[in-house]
Image (cartoon, rainbow, N blue to C red):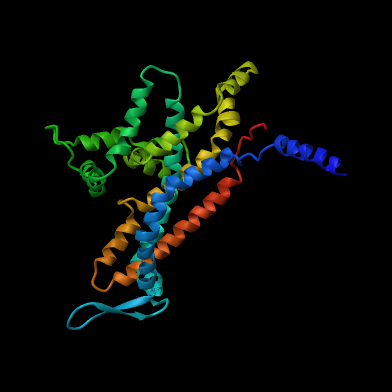
Amino acid sequence: MTNDMEKAAPDVEASKQSAPKKRKKIVSLDRRKARSGWLFVLPFVIGFVIIYLPMIYESIVFSFNKIIPGTGGGGYTLEFVGWENYREALFVDPDFAQTLLSGILEMAFDIPAIIIFSLFMAVMLNQKMVGRGVFRAIFFIPVILSTGIMESIEAMNILGDYVEDSTGIDDGSGTSTADQLVSAMDLQQLFANMKVGTDLVEYVVTMINNIYDIVNRSGVQMLIFLASLQSISPAIYESCKIDGATSWETFWKITFPMITPMILVNGIYTIIDSFTTESNSVMTFISNVYSQADGNVVSSAMAWVYFLIVIAIVAIIGGVLSAFVFYQRKSE
């Protein structure tokens, strides 16, 4: 019995030595990317929680209260009034509702024009040609110029006021070069001769008159579309060319479906950009109301109404475009 136990002991020790050691758990690539993403956005999250979140909370509190100035030593107290500020913003002040409607309509007209223009220019700049990098830089310059002090100058619309001035530049003959330019490019008359609908004519003419603003706001969207176009495999285009597909068919059957995710991204980005720009008529109106003595709390209610409307528009457009987005599935 003892001999059997002694023989079994070395076998147990050998089995313990031959047993594989537990390996450390290897983190998957997706989890590593997720952690890197969280580290990347961590400064924004910290700043949002510490700086912006208290401001958002105070804005909500002000929109449901009335400010009563303090006596003697200054300060103020808040008196809860419920939805009174929102009722005043929507039903009492007629200018806000009118400005809000015109701002939403302006956004509805500008977004398709910006996306179509940026997509068109991205397709053109993606073609092989001499000096392609220079042309790309030229079309991105408006994005740089439309930031900081240049955006403030643009918000004053000095150039637009000068162009729209009826006097223009007098060439000595008593006529204005601005008038000559308008008469030479009478686009409304051109479209009228083509028997196009009146609404379409007004839309096209409005977009052409706002071409400077559209170009300024299309730079980022153009780069996003350009990056998406360059991510399409050239082998797909070669296959289409071998099959005899035309450039028109290749664009609508291959290029357009594969960049639909970026159309969704650019659509949402353009809405947010329109919402935050200094030239936004609704934001300018709210800022003017805020500067008034008794308009501080009402302006908070106006801002939240506009914010909720924009969020609803983003949700609707995101939901509609998501139904038509094509996502290429990689073979596993």
How many marks are shown on the rendered structure?
0
- Tell which residue pokes out farthest to the bottom in this image: 71
**In the shown orientation, is residue 72 left or right of residue 312?**
left
Residue 158: name its quadrant. top left
Query: Residue 240 location, x and y as percent?
Result: 62, 21
> Residue at 24% of width from left, 34% of height from top?
180
> Residue at 72% of width from left, 39% of height from top?
16
- Tell which residue pokes out farthest to the front in this image: 2
- Nearer-the-camera pick, 137 or 12: 12
> Residue at 60% of width from left, 40% of height from top?
24
* 276 to 115, vertically: above or below: below
Query: Residue 157 location, x and y as percent?
Result: 24, 46
Question: Is any part of residue 106 visible from this angle?
Answer: no
* 283 to 161, vertically: above or below: below
Report the quarter where the C terminus lies.
Answer: top right
**In the shown orientation, is residue 166 left or right of residue 78?**
left
- Tell which residue pokes out farthest to the left in this image: 172
**In the shown orientation, is residue 125 left or right of residue 175?**
right
Question: Is any part of residue 64 visible from this angle?
Answer: yes
- Nearer-the-camera pick, 301 or 160: 301
* 309 to 218, vertically: above or below: below
Query: Residue 62 location, x and y as percent?
Result: 35, 72
- Nearer-the-camera pick, 107 or 70: 70
Query: Residue 100 location, x and y as percent?
Result: 39, 60
Report the quarter where the N terminus lies.
Answer: top right
> Residue at 42% of width from left, 34% of height from top?
223
